[in-house]
């Protein structure tokens, strides 16, 4: 019996979450380390982005067997917002405000329409 996490519906989402953690880190980790030179930040971020691609490409390849491309992109966007919100709050110590919640709710509403068949 296949594991829940290796299900063709779940594995792409798990990989997209992992890839987003790396990509969000690549884009924003350096904001707490202003003393690191820009060229070093770029090189470190490229290394993190490489790992992100190694996760995102298989996620999309395997995900395309059970999801439409528009659905995969919608999953990606929702995951990106959730990962960024957590990263911003936990790592950058930035509070999330009511307007962020409303914006995220509109994205969730859009995701509903992408996945809902009429």
Image (cartoon, rainbow, N blue to C red):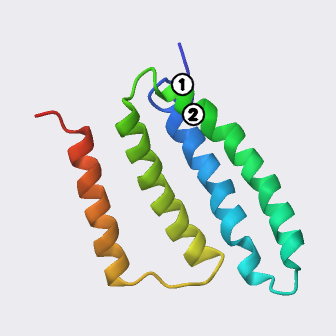
Give the side of residue 40 with respect to residue 109, left or right. Answer: right
Q: Mark on residue 62? A: 1
Kindly give the residue lying farthest to the top in the view shown: 1
Question: Residue 74 location in percent, x, y?
Answer: 38, 46
**Which label belongs to residue 7?**
none
Give the quarter of the image for residue 21: bottom right
Disc 2 crowd, CA 10 A, few/some/many (<14, 14-19, 20+): many
**Residue 34's image quarter?**
bottom right
- Quarter occupied by the C terminus: top left
Question: Which residue is found at the position 50% from the left and 57% from the top?
Answer: 80
Apparent side of residue 117 relative to residue 64 in the rendered image (left or right) = left
Closest to the observer, 38 or 32: 38
Residue 71, position in %: x, y?
36, 38
Contact (CB < 8 A) between labels 1 and 2? yes
Q: Nearer the viewer, residue 42 or 9?
A: 42
Q: Is residue 95 above or below residue 111?
A: below
Q: Residue at x 28, y 65 (%)?
A: 105
**Nearer to me, 73 or 66:** 73
Q: Is residue 112 above or below residue 57?
A: below
Q: Position of residue 49 (x, y in %)?
A: 73, 52
Q: Secondary structure at mark 1?
A: helix
Q: How many marks?
A: 2
Real-space Cα separation, disc 1 to disc 2, in angstroms: 5 Å
Secondary element under disc 2, as helix, strand or loop, is helix
In this view, 23 is above or below 5: below
- Neighbor class of circle 1 (other Cα within 10 Å; few <14, some 14-19, many 20+) is some
Quickly name the residue at label 2. Answer: 59
Residue 24, percent from left and from top: 63, 62
Residue at 41% across, 54% down: 78
Q: On the rendered structure, is 107 left or right of 8?
A: left
């Amino acid at each position: 019996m296949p594991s829940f996490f290796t299900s063709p519906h779940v594995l792409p989402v798990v990989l997209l979450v992992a890839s987003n953690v790396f990509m969000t880190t690549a884009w924003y980790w350096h904001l707490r380390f202003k003393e690191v030179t820009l060229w070093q930040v770029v090189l470190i971020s490229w290394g993190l982005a490489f790992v992100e691609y190694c996760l995102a490409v298989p996620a999309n390849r395997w995900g395309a067997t059970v999801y439409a491309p528009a659905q995969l992109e919608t999953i990606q966007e929702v995951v990106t917002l959730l990962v960024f919100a957590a990263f911003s709050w936990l790592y950058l110590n930035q509070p999330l405000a009511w307007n962020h919640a409303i914006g995220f709710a509109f994205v969730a509403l859009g995701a509903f329409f992408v996945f809902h068949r009429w």
